[in-house]
Amino acid sequence: MTSQPFFTRHGDDFIPTSVANGPWDPKSLHGRVVIGLLAFVIEQRHGGADFVPARLTVDMFRLPNIETPIEVRTKSIRDGLRIRLIEADFVSGGVAMARASCQLLRRTENPPGTVWSPPNWDAPQPGDIAAPTDPRLGMHGKWTTRPIVGTMGTVGPRRLWMSEVRPLVEAAPLTPFVRVALAADFASPFANAGDQGLGYINTDVTLYLHRLPATEWIGFEVVNHHAKEGIAIGECWLYDEQGAIGTSTVAALAQRNAMPKLAPSP
C-alpha cells in the first residue's frame, strides 16, 4: 500500500494525519483508528506467535483531537503460560481518551468430540462483486467495500466485505490482528443505522476472535440490533474468505443529529 497512513511516528508518539478524522467531528479521530492503534501497540509489545488475541475491548469515552500527538501506555496484568491480559491507555495531550483490555490465549489443540457451530455463510467472494460507485461506502478512501446484500439503514439482512486501503502506521505492514481491529468499529454503523441515517455513536467495541483472519477481506453480517431510551447494542458476525473468524459487538448512545442515510445498494 502506498496511500497516506493514519499515523506517522515521532519517537514514542504517534502523529495523526489528516485522513484519520472521524464522521462526527472533522477535528477528532475516527474510532476505527483509535481501536487499531491500541491493537497495534498491544501486539507489538505483548503479542507472540503462540498466542491469539481472543478478545479486545476498547472503551472510547472522549473524542481525541486530530492535531494532538498520541501516546499509548500498556500494562501487563497477567503473563501466564496459557493466558496474557493486557491493559492499554490511549492518551492525547496527557489525557486518557480510550482504554483497551486484551486477552491473549495460547494456541493448542481442540479437545475431542463434535460441538455444534453455525453454518458458514453463503456469501459470494469479494473478487466476484463489483466495487461500489458511492464513495461514502468507503468514507471517501478510508477503506474499500464490496456490498453483498443491503446497506446501512435498509430493512432486512445486511452483509458486506471490507478491506483496508491505507497503512495504520507509516512503514508498518498491517498484521491480521490490526487489520480486523481496524475494521471492527464498522459494526456500529452497519448494525445501528436506520432509515433516517446513523443516529448512534458507539462508546465501545468488543472484538472476539477464535482465529486471526487469513485474507485481506473482512466480512460483516448484522445479527443483532436493539435500542431503548437512547441506548443501543449492535453485533456483527465476522468472516474472512475462508470462513467465520469471530464477532464484533458495540454499545452506542443516541446522537442529536443523525448522519445522512445511504441509498440502498442496487
Image (cartoon, rainbow, N blue to C red):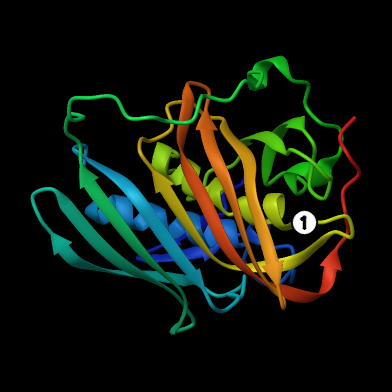
251 vs 156, nearest the viewer: 156
Picture quadrant of residue 194: bottom right
Position of residue 252 in the picture relative to residue 114 (left or right): right
Number of numbered discs on residues: 1
Estimate the x, y position of residue 120 in percent, counting from the top left. Answer: 52, 24
Estimate the x, y position of residue 124 in percent, counting from the top left. Answer: 66, 18
Estimate the x, y position of residue 101 in percent, counting from the top left. Answer: 34, 64
Q: Does 236 appear above or below 99?
A: above
205 vs 29, nearest the viewer: 205
Residue that badge 1 annotates:
193
Q: Does 93 appear above or below 142?
A: below
| Furthest residue in direction top, as rendered | 128
Determine whether the residue tagged by mark 1 lies in a helix, strand or loop. Answer: loop
Q: Quarter of the image for the N terminus: give it.
A: top right
Amino acid beneath label 1: Ala
Picture quadrant of residue 32: bottom right
- Local crowd at mark 1 within 10 Å, few (<14), some, or many (≥20)? many
Whether residue 43 is visible, yes or no, is yes
Picture residue at 85% right of the left edge, 59% below the top:
197
